[in-house]
Image (spheres, rainbow, N blue to C red):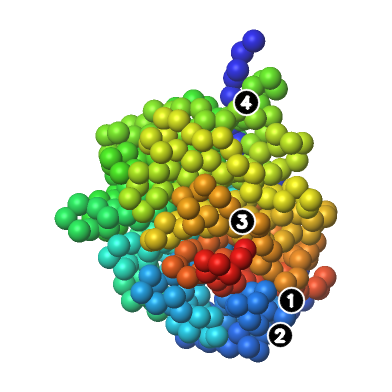
Amino acid sequence: MGTGTKGTSRSPWPLVLMAVGILVLGVAGLRFFGGDGGDTVSALDEGPLADCDVGGCKANADPLPARGYEVPSVVVDPGDPDHLVVADVNLVGGVCGWHVTFDGGAEWADGVFELPSGFRNCQLDSAGFLAAGNVARGPSGTLYYVLSSARVDQAEQALEGESVLVARSNDGGRTFAPATVAVPGASTEVSYVRPSLNVVAGPDGADRVLLSFWECGQETCPRVQFAQSLDGGASYSAPALVSPDIGGSSPSVPVLGADGTVHVMFVRHSDDPSVGSQLALARSADGGASFTNTTIESQPFLGRTYDAAELGTSPDGATLYTVFSDNRQGRPDVFFRRSTDGGDTWDQAVLLNSLSEGGAFLPNVSVGPEGRIDVVFYQQSRKSINDVIWTHSSDGGDTFPRPLQLNDASIDRDVGYTFEVGDSYGPGVASSPAAAFVVWSDSRLGNGLTDTQDTALRRAPVPTVGAGT
């Protein structure tokens, strides 16, 4: 029996989301984001999203009811845990932006990423995905944000497929320079979408920017691609194919091993029900020029729609960690696996979520400079109701304490915009020595009229030894 693979089908959501956005704008008559990078608001004025240490605070300065923030990511300054930068997309208006705080979330300032001339706003791309990627901090202290966008003419007709764009900040997120094209779009039949980035130490002290992204055709998104910059984002390599077989999707953030190997995890779905889904590790021993693939897991179904398996490494790069969700128990659950030999072999999967609650999905992982592994994900307690769950390991993945719920009010996905985009974007996490900083999309300030959705941030202190878990 054959084991043919399939690509990821494009989403039908753009028209739905456009209609919802138009309705919201018509009701509220509003502008988007905080706008010019100068607006600030105190988290203490936000009532039920007021305390970053208890339940979460509103991680943006936008006071307008019609706002719909999604695809959140966060970085923390290793020398100052009160200095945080959050990036996301406002679905109302279709713009990507950032929010920065220098006082642990008491006050925020907003900004909008400026795109190159001729590119449309950060919005749903031709494949139906949100164009936003993630924010990361390089060893130099420079901040990087990645997104995808296409050049269009005055009639809003695409001139080429989506390109991968990168914006940089050299002042801690107070401002970002206009985004530049990292990977140019090809013909209108080929788009590069849903990008992710990681930034590591490169040659001659320059930041090395590692990019992963999907290659989409007119009907499906069947391949994963990789590109990189060795000069701090001044120039980028041509794309290198990560998944040579049709069906590769949902790539992780690329990570670098101790021996210089580039690693990317991705998911392959098969047309053959006896094969199901495969979790695959792509490795490049030639600096990212070419990749070989190894199957790590085979399950009836891996992930949830576009649920990526994420990768992390120990601070020395010697150990790989991956988190992913699959349906081996008849529902989505989140698992952790570890490899101490560069991905050749992997420890048995460890279940991270509680079996007494509903399914868990969309995990993310961060490893702090001291080696603590932070894992976050959504858990669905009942239909359309999500909670934000965090667990961590301070012994390299040997043990994880009981997972904790970080949000003090469950998230109703019938309010807001996450349901409209397929519930396909998980929480983000950044590790500092004493705490994990977790961001997620939260609709508690919304209602059936405005569908207000914010990015919320929670500071989760790590229990000290002897304090219990």
Between marks 4 and 3 in the image, the one whose residue lies nearer the viewer = 3
Query: Which residue position is annotated with label 4?
Result: 270
Query: Do labels 4 and 2 touch, CB within 8 Å?
Result: no
Q: Residue at x 70, y 34 (%)?
A: 328
Disc 3: which residue? 401
Q: Are marks 4 and 1 in contact (CB under 8 Å)?
A: no
Compute the Cα span from label 4 to label 1: 41 Å
Count of numbered tags: 4
Q: Position of residue 373 (x, y in %)?
A: 49, 55
Which residue is denoted by mark 2 in the rendering?
A: 47
Q: What separation in Å lies between label 3 and label 1 (alpha carbons)?
A: 31 Å
Q: In the picture, which quadrant includes the C terminus?
A: bottom right
Secondary structure at badge 2 equals helix
Q: How many C-alpha atoms fall within 10 Å of the one at disc 4: few (<14), some, or many (≥20)?
A: many
Asked if the residues shown at circle 1 and circle 2 are in contact, with their CB atoms under 8 angstroms apart, the answer is yes
Tell us which disc is closer to us: 2 or 3: 3
Residue type at mark 3? Pro
Q: Are marks 3 and 1 in contact (CB under 8 Å)?
A: no
